Image (tube, coloured by chain):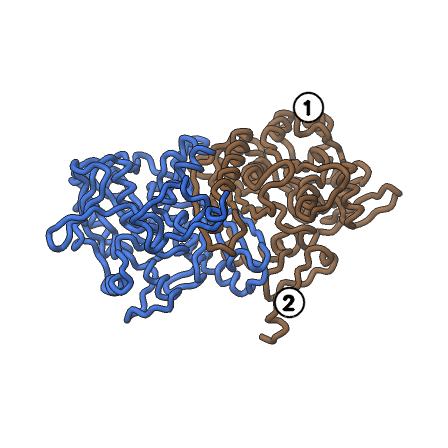
Chain colours: A blue, B brown
Amino acid sequence: MSDTTDLPAPSLDVEGWTCPAPLRDRPRVVMGHGGGGALSAELVQQIFAPSYGGEALSQMGDAAVLSLGGARLAFSTDSYVVRPLFFPGGSIGDLAVNGTVNDLAMSGARAAYLSCGFILEEGVELDTVTRVAEALGAAARTAGVEVATGDTKVVEAGHGDGIYLNTAGIGVVPAGVDLRPQRVVPGDVVIVSGAIGVHGVAIMSVREGLEFGVEIESDCAALGGLVEAMLAVTPDLHVLRDPTRGGLAASLNEIAAASGAGVVIRERDVPVPPAVANACAILGLDPMYIANEGKLVAFVPREHADAVLAAMRAHPLGTDAAIIGEAVDSHPGMLVARTGLGGTRVVDLPLGEQLPRIC
Amino acid sequence: MSDTTDLPAPSLDVEGWTCPAPLRDRPRVVMGHGGGGALSAELVQQIFAPSYGGEALSQMGDAAVLSLGGARLAFSTDSYVVRPLFFPGGSIGDLAVNGTVNDLAMSGARAAYLSCGFILEEGVELDTVTRVAEALGAAARTAGVEVATGDTKVVEAGHGDGIYLNTAGIGVVPAGVDLRPQRVVPGDVVIVSGAIGVHGVAIMSVREGLEFGVEIESDCAALGGLVEAMLAVTPDLHVLRDPTRGGLAASLNEIAAASGAGVVIRERDVPVPPAVANACAILGLDPMYIANEGKLVAFVPREHADAVLAAMRAHPLGTDAAIIGEAVDSHPGMLVARTGLGGTRVVDLPLGEQLPRIC
């Protein structure tokens, strides 16, 4: 290996995502590999799936749906490396519960049990560990999920970053519920459960010391109850996603690619709070790519859309739910936004994440 | 807080475990909190259980046994932070499969599905990630378990340590199987599946550059098949544990404490390979405290002990299985070793781990 390729590849998180480079030209891990965009997908498709992928992993949903012991279960995991550990509206403990609970909810499952693995850095204050554990416990009680099993490892000071967490979750998928992008058909209505971009901007504001006029709190929340309310209208929803890393753009691109349908959204119908819009304008970011932690996007058969929207708006976590677009039979696999001026633009899968370690 | 308490507490991993200090006198995380001994137990009992513990967590087994969707499931998790990533006889990828598969096996469950979370350090070579993923895949195929769902996060260079892994696993517990320390009664026979101390000494030899005459390979292996062979003799085994961090001493102490029975072992009957004995003699360590990754210890009703031992010896992972002691009604909750010279000694729960980051 030459001296040049021996150096770490530059991080491409902020400015690089319009210029994807194939994995083979990139000998080392860059921050964007953890961003939930094109680089993350490459890692899965080129390394993880060939090494150990089976039928379940190939579903590529937020959770795998499995048959085990006569039960139909959802199973999902996420690690959490957010920096800082505490931020307006939440902490790594809240994220570790809600992130995994939401991944299960996107398969229609109510989370029943979580595992919890702590990787602690030598020297971190036990008070900090206690605050995180208490936040995790409070979030679990709110979400109605039980932490059933755990593990703790400690790494030397200077490694780790205070606390990393991993949770995995299991829950039962109700009979008749089958949520996958492959079920999306042209004509499906796209509904988002509320304002987008809030979590990412909240993290940015504390990490970079930026002020955007008003304090923005993370939208971190558990969506199991909202999903139950939607499924009570009809079990025949087609797909749900929580647009975390990579934002709404990544989720909608993944659904378009996996379904083969095209997706059109109307920009002016996407709920973006003024504080998020201002922050994005200042920083040159697109709210479509900013992470959320308490929102979902749904593809709903047209005949059920109004009733599902009403049920969402009647739930505390869906009061600002809005229809933002639809699945179409033109431009298959692509996400297109109609701009406020009447034009259209292609919204690509991001390469990485605009701000790393947001969850 | 004074300047003195503001400093990180000293790491007590090697020499300190005979002198436990209560958690309240220790304001920060030390390496021993991840060692699987008394400090780890304090962390769980004083911070984690009060914050989020429920009925399942209070089982304190290697895996939680749960009812979900009509199925009786085992659920377990471990994070893996071993250094170096590759060692004689295995890698972090093998550990991440076998460690979690074995935790499930200790409840009698055959592992069905694993989740897998990678925390990658920016700059680690993708070739290294690929080698770990391939080792993980090979170990999963050997163990007969499917990786169903995953996640990848990336942390900045200088944080993390190349690769941390977390796996969680689920499997079905067979009907009639109820493995818990509370079922141990005086008279139960203690059987170990083979030579102890091998994994810890293998890691020590590569990390510290020590030579012990012969190369020692980790015993890292998946024990699901061995457990199935034992349960085929009788489902009425009382408890199984895989003595990883903290070694045989930690596992037997935990069983003694949770069962209320005393445990006696005969030192000369405990299989310790000469290379492990030599390494321990040189380093002043006790093989009873050294980690294993492919061994189990069983408490078996006396009437089944010979048949279970025979079944273990007929399995490739149990050829050196041996009866090493028994549960007694004297000294309840304590582990006592009869020495080769006819004396006895109390074998305490270790405070931490003699060598951190062995798994």
- Determine crowd level at label 2: few under 14, some 14-19, many 20+ residues with C-alpha closer than 10 A: few
Measured as percent of width and height from the top left, residue B314 is found at: 68, 23
Q: Where B17 falls versus A127 (above or below)?
A: above
Q: Which callout, 1 or 2, points at the residue further toward the start of the chain?
A: 2
Question: In the displayed structure, does residue B73 sit left or right of residue B260?
Answer: left
Q: Where is residue B320 in the image (x, y as percent from the top left)?
A: 73, 30
Q: Position of residue B159 (x, y in %)?
A: 51, 56
> Chain ID for label 2?
B
Residue located beneath label 2 in the image:
B25
Residue B150 seen in the figure: yes
Q: Which of B198 and B126 is in front in this view?
A: B126
Mark 1, residues whose alpha carbon is within 10 Å: few (<14), some, or many (≥20)?
A: some
Q: Is mark 2 on a helix, strand or loop?
A: helix
Judged from this view, the residue extending furthest toward the bottom is B2
Contact, mark 1 vs mark 2 (Cβ under 8 Å): no
Q: Which amino acid type is shown beneath numbered disc 1?
A: Ala
- Quadrant in the picture for residue B247: top right
**Quadrant of res A282:** bottom left
Against B252, is A123 above or below?
A: below
Task: Identify the element where label 1 is drawn.
Answer: loop
Q: Which numbered circle lies on residue B314?
A: 1
Marks 1/2: CA–CA distance: 50 Å
